[in-house]
Amino acid sequence: RNRVWLNRLFHAADLRITIGGVKIHSIAGYSGGAKAVLPGVCGFQTIRHNHLVIGKSNKTAVEGKIFTNELRRDIVEAARLARVDFSVQIVSNNRLQPCAIFAGDVVEAHTEACRAANRLHRTVTLKNADVVISSGYPANSQAGKALPWIDRSVREGGTGVLVMQHPAGIMSWHYLYPEGYPAKGDPLAFLAPRAANPRKYQLIVYSQYLQKAQESMFPPGARFATRWEDVVSLLMARHKAAASVAVYPYGCLQHQEIELDG
């Protein structure tokens, strides 16, 4: 069991209202809902236990699962202990405009929002493409989360292009490390793109903001470009004949054709 350390101002409030955006999440099923409490206003001890004890190698903590997900259950329990009074859950379109809003109980509103997101954000995966372009939008500061689209779509020996446009380059937003640099050996370093599995394709990273020191956070052999013209030149050099191309413009919002577990 987790011990919940809660922000004292939130705990002391007469009325506790949470507002969250709902999109796919690699271990919590979907973002939003009770996550406004854990990790939102919880102490690092509580967050670490949730992520690294309950969530570590937990087969239930996967994309799209919110009912049988043990990590999500721990998050919900924290929100219940915090006595959230009211919650607003927002499902956005590709321009980050609200297209569905659910309000009420922090769990029930989130469940309905997840059902809407599952219908609106699911995307067919193109297999064995010569070139796959995946954008980290709308989570450009953690654009590495868009890499799975390349893994799933590109053929062996093909080329994957990761587009990441954030002024900070890479930013974990966990406030635990210096900006953009996960601590070496720390389990939360999975936020770094380098933590992905060894790749059987050429990775090109396009960013106008990526710092030179941050390039080491990517898999060995990755190429980097600050101009789109340079990306095109690299692609033309590797794929001289006609090539099949898959483009995922909202790589951190779109998700596979997965079903909710309830």
Image (spheres, grey):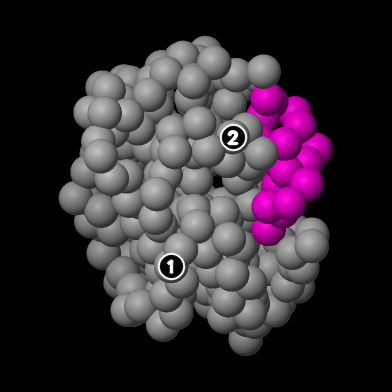
Residue most toward the left? 167
**Where's residue 259, x and y in %?**
77, 68
Q: Residue at 33% of width from left, 21% of height from top?
A: 176
Q: Residue at label 2?
A: 77
* In this picture, residue 239 sits left or right of residue 134: right
Q: Is residue 108 magenta?
A: no
- The answer to whether the residue labelled 1 contacts the one labelled 2, judged by CB atoms less than 8 Å apart, is no
The earlier-in-sequence mark between 1 and 2 is 2
The magenta-colored residue range is: 54-71
Q: Which three-letter amino acid code belongs to the residue tagged 1?
A: Ala
Residue 74 in sight from this viewpoint: yes
CA distance separating discs 1 and 2: 19 Å
Question: Could you say which is closer to the camera, residue 247 or residue 95?
Answer: 95
Q: Which mark is residue 103?
A: 1
Q: Residue at 36% of width from left, 78% of height from top?
A: 98
Question: Considering only vertical position in the picture, is 48 above or below 141?
Answer: above
**Where's residue 241, x and y in %?**
62, 82
Residue most toward the bottom? 242
Q: Residue at 64% of width from left, 52% of height from top?
A: 29
* In this picture, residue 91 sits left or right of residue 201: left
* In this picture, residue 67 sits left or right of residue 72: right
Question: Could you say which is closer to the camera, residue 182 or residue 238?
Answer: 182
